[in-house]
Amino acid sequence: MAITGSCHCGKVRYTLDVDTDEAMACNCSICRRKGYLLTFATPDKFAFTGAAEDLTVYTFGSHNIRHQFCKTCGCAPFGEGTGPDGQAMVAVNLRCADVDLDALKVTRFDGASL
Ligand SMILES: [Zn+2]
């Protein structure tokens, strides 16, 4: 079952072809500030269904992850980067998904210590 999501104003939308009830909460410098609840997928399982001009991108540090966010409302529905195995990866923010956040099994990840 696909998971759909969007930013607050609705310009940035996604469909994630992964059925999951698990999310990762990381304490690294950006995740803690954004409040991300993340799940990860390969790009073939993810579709951005908005207009590219509605997105803007933030990178920092090694610039490995492109943190995409909506130009209008500032919500950050997903990011793109490379996984530990060198494969392209999409980090999907389930806080923007049409799911019951309280039902997610959240695993804490100590990204701050990396
Ligand atoms: Zn928006």
Image (cartoon, rainbow, N blue to C red):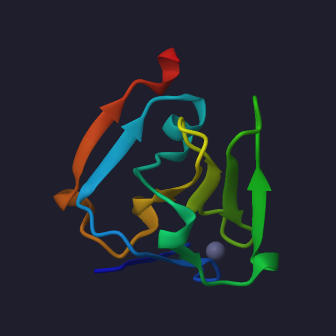
Q: Residue furthest right?
A: 53
Task: State whether residue 92 appears in this view.
Answer: yes
Q: Which x, y percent locates residue 55?
A: 75, 70
Q: Residue at x 50, y 21 (%)?
A: 112
Q: Which x, y percent locates residue 47?
A: 56, 77
Quadrant position of residue 3: bottom left
Q: Residue at x 40, y 50 (%)?
A: 37
In this rendering, the answer to whether 30 lies above or below 22 is above
Q: Quadrant of the N terminus?
A: bottom left
Task: State whether residue 8 appears in this view.
Answer: no
Quadrant position of residue 70: bottom right
The quadrant of the picture showing ligand 1 is: bottom right
Q: Residue at x 36, y 43 (%)?
A: 24
Q: Which x, y percent locates residue 18?
A: 35, 69
In this rendering, the answer to whether 35 lies above or below 6 is above
Q: How many marks?
A: 0
